[in-house]
Amino acid sequence: MHDAVVIGAGPIGCYTAYQLAREGFDVLVLEKNGSFTHPPACTGIIGVEAFERFNLPEDSILSSIRDILFFSPSGLALTFCPGSTQAFVVDRIKFDRRLRELALKNGASIRLGTSCKEIQIKDTHVEIGVSGTEENIKAKAVVIASGFNRRLSENLGLGNTSDYIQGVQTEVKVEGVKETRVYVGNDIAPGSFAWVVGLENGRARIGLTTKHNASIFLRRFLENPLLRGKIKEKGAILYKLIPIGSLKRTYSDRMLVVGEAAGLVKTTTHGGIYYGLISSQLAVETLKEAFRRGDFGSRIMKRYEGRWRERLGAEIKTGYRLRRFFSHLRDEQIDKFFKIAMNDGVMDIVYQKVRFDWHGNLIFSLVRHSPIKKYFSKWR
Ligand SMILES: Cc1cc2nc3c(=O)[nH]c(=O)nc-3n(C[C@H](O)[C@H](O)[C@H](O)COP(=O)(O)OP(=O)(O)OC[C@H]3O[C@@H](n4cnc5c(N)ncnc54)[C@H](O)[C@@H]3O)c2cc1C
């Protein structure tokens, strides 16, 4: 009988296993993939704050992000130059490998090529049915870190995330693209945005999120005059669904759900690594209490949900409301927003309030600012 089984050896599953193993618990990670040779669909942008707070592998950093240029549908440009590094771009294959190594070094085991098929919660333990064997794996507790997986969360009676969006990305060889650019507009990424992140090695990650046909929009974006001639060598287009909003419930007896599996992703930008790490830390804190008391019932496990809601709940809700508002706007209405932001003291508020991973405070300050307030009440 293991102390804990973690489902999924993504960054959040491995970080959870590392923290539990470091405390002396017997932890097994189950991962359905047999190897990790392909990069995941992820741009790998992780804020400086995450590197300060967590034990993350600095040798996976490829470049840093400082200034960001935002482009409206008609080409109006808004420049955000905060004067300091805001985030890093990591090599996700290396980042994930280092986190697996960290978990292993601290005593966790990882079983690759093993898919979790079923979880049964018993009075005294959890039984996990896996691919390739009739024998169930037993543990005192299970942590679900399987990424976005609607079927699994529904089967476990945890409900589903309120919404989701398609995310696509490619890495290309480029000339003359060094900075980070964000493009909005219904011809580029309806209801959402596209990004170009120049790396320091002559390559760039280009991607977008949108509700439907994301791959078609990305192919079209790569042919856009904004990029044409700059791309010297194309790469594969990687696709993934991203949850928007959390699961209705992220715990039950002997079970916690963390990271993207729980829908704990920034609703403004869809970045999931930092909020996932925070949820992982809060899950481990809760499990430590459960082990101390020898009680893995819902009453104790529920504390995890209270903790992440206190830390992340308002951010997730506020970002979701903002995104819903912007997703319905026509291009000329988005342009109007850029015009207001380029004048009217809006960027002063942005510089005062912005934090790379926390947008709620900035959103509240902006909607109280008179020109923006008028804009929102006009188009709501
Ligand atoms: C185009 C795109 C760009 C993105 N860019 C960024 C970015 O720049 N910054 C950022 O922070 N986030 C970004 N994200 C989101 C980020 O990639 C995810 O939030 C992050 O990978 C979530 O980590 P995780 O460990 O929770 O899940 P995952 O990385 O999905 O890992 C889950 C693991 O569980 C395994 N698994 C699943 N089901 C089972 C099962 N039944 N049994 C065993 N194993 C299982 C999977 O194989 C996988 O290895 C992006 C997403 C997309 C789509």
Image (spheres, rainbow, N blue to C red):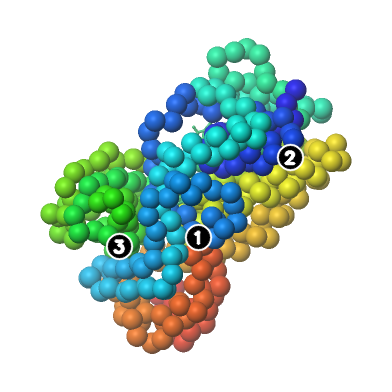
Nearer-N-terminus badge (1/3): 1
Residue 322 rendering spot, x and y as whole percentages? 47, 66
**Label 1: which secondary element:** helix
Badge 3 amino acid: Glu
For disc 2, does the CB lie below 8 Å from ligand 1? no
**Mark 3 beta carbon near ligand 1 (under 8 Å):** no
Question: Which x, y percent locates residue 362?
Answer: 51, 74
Residue nearer the viewer, 295 or 322: 295
- Disc 2 crowd rating (10 Å Cα; few below 14, some 14-19, many 20+) is few
Q: Which mark is residue 23?
A: 2
Q: Look at the numbered disc 2 and give the secondary structure of its residue.
A: loop
* In this picture, residue 329 sits left or right of residue 296: left
Q: Which mark is residue 48?
A: 1
> If you read the primary sequence from the N terminus, does the residue marked by circle 3 or circle 2 appear first?
2
- The residue type indicated by label 2 comes to Glu
> Cα distance, mark 2 to mark 1?
26 Å
Instruction: Using the numbered discs, state the Cα–Cα distance from disc 3 to disc 2 in whole angstroms.
Output: 41 Å
Residue that appears at 22% across and 70% down: 74
Residue under numbered circle 3: 179
Disc on res. 257: none
* Any part of residue 246 in sight: no
Which circle's residue, 2 or 1, is located before the other in the chain?
Answer: 2
Whether residue 79 is visible here, answered yes or no, is: yes
- Quarter of the image containing the C terminus? bottom left
- Please state the total of marks drawn on the protein image: 3
**In x, y percent, where is residue 377?**
45, 79
